[in-house]
Image (spheres, rainbow, N blue to C red):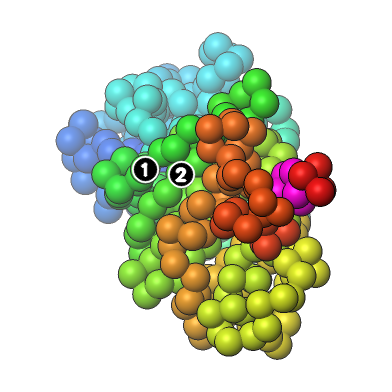
Amino acid sequence: MEVKKILIPNKPHLDPVAAIFLLMKYGKEKFTGIEDANIIFWENSENPTEEEIKNFEKEGVLLIDVGGGIFDHHNKNTHETTTSLVASYLGIEQNPELSSLLTYIREDDLEGLHNRYGELAYLLKVMYKQNTSLSEVVGTALHILELFQAGQMDWHYKVKGEYEAKKQILKVKRNQKKLKVGIIESDNVQVANYGITQDNVSVIIQKRSSGHVMILTNKHHRIDLREVIGAIRKKELELMGYDKTIDARKLRFEGKNSQLPNWFYHRSLNSFLNGSDALVKAEPTKVPFNDIVRFVIYSLTTDKSELCDCHQSGQNCPYVEYGFIKCQERKRNQN
């Protein structure tokens, strides 16, 4: 079908606008010229008559969410939205980059969940209240959807590919469970989040080519990073020439300080960052990456084969001076 115009309801909510976005992005072969079609609005309270619909078809007008056609979800399955009808028609409903969008539209259109400040669906309603022109409302929404989906494409293809190619996964025994610890060297700041959300790792340690390191945790796994934070900070101070007798337990504070400005403990996110997109001037850590990984693994594990030997008052233990509770307990038992 050659499309010259797209007809949608007056003051459309997000669902028909997202449907147009999918048609323009994925439907060019089935709907010739749709990417350049003008968008017009049906202002009548009644649906177009059969004669009007036939005339629209002759004139190259595609009806979206009006007129009872294939892309009008009214009086159809209550679990369908206009956007999901379009996705199904185009055969793209299983595309991973569309999962979040289709879920969002369903939640908004069928469940009314997105009426809060900052929500895209809510933004359209605010624009209508400010008497913004219909064309500007739709144009703004289409532009935002384009930006959002560009990020989704990166996430599901570029980020996934890099994560899968570069990840190293260590399984750590912790009581009766086995935790996954991800280790990766990459400059893509999204790969760590991908590992947590898509690969269900408990902790991921990422090193950039600049030498900066960040440690992120899975909020659902309730990981306590404080021992690791104290150990890394103590090691950092030692490599900077500070007194080696400093107590690692006193270095588990939130944020950063003047002695250690390059490490930031983000308590609410339970992450430990040596630089980030926001902290661009932080010096890369002096602590060897292998030591950082060993500190994380040792903090998590309860596997005796992975633990240190704290005999002889801990003299041969590489961890006892770094504030790990298990070392301190064994040292006290030896004494």
* Front residue (pair 254, 71): 254
Three-letter amino acid code at the position of disc 1: Gln
**Percent position of residue 69, x then y:** 42, 21
**Percent position of residue 169, x then y:** 41, 38
| Label whose residue precedes the other's in the sequence (2 or 1) | 1
Q: Is residue 281 left or right of residue 302?
A: left
Q: Is residue 118 left or right of residue 142?
A: right
Q: Residue at x 54, y 13 (%)?
A: 76
* Front residue (pair 76, 198): 198
Residue 187 sits above or below residue 84 on the image: below
The span picked out in magenta is 326-331
Q: Is residue 287 magenta?
A: no
Mark 1 and mark 2 in contact (Cβ < 8 Å)?
A: yes
Q: Is residue 249 left or right of residue 150?
A: right
**Percent position of residue 46, x then y:** 60, 28
The residue where tag 2 is placed is: 182
Quarter placement of the N terminus? top left
Q: Is residue 107 visible?
A: yes
Are there few (<14), some (14-19), or many (20+) residues within 10 Å of tag 1? some
Q: Main secondary structure of the magenta part?
A: helix
Are there few (<14), some (14-19), or many (20+) residues within 10 Å of tag 2? many
Three-letter amino acid code at the position of disc 2: Gly
Residue 206 disc label: none
Kindly report the distance in space between the C-alpha atoms of the residues bearing marks 2 and 1: 6 Å
Q: Quadrant of residue 133?
A: bottom right
Q: Residue at x 67, y 36 (%)?
A: 221
Residue 1 sits above or below residue 322 on the image: above
Q: Residue at x 51, y 52 (%)?
A: 294
Asked which secondary structure carries label 1, the reply is: strand
Q: Is residue 260 visible?
A: no
The residue where tag 1 is placed is: 168
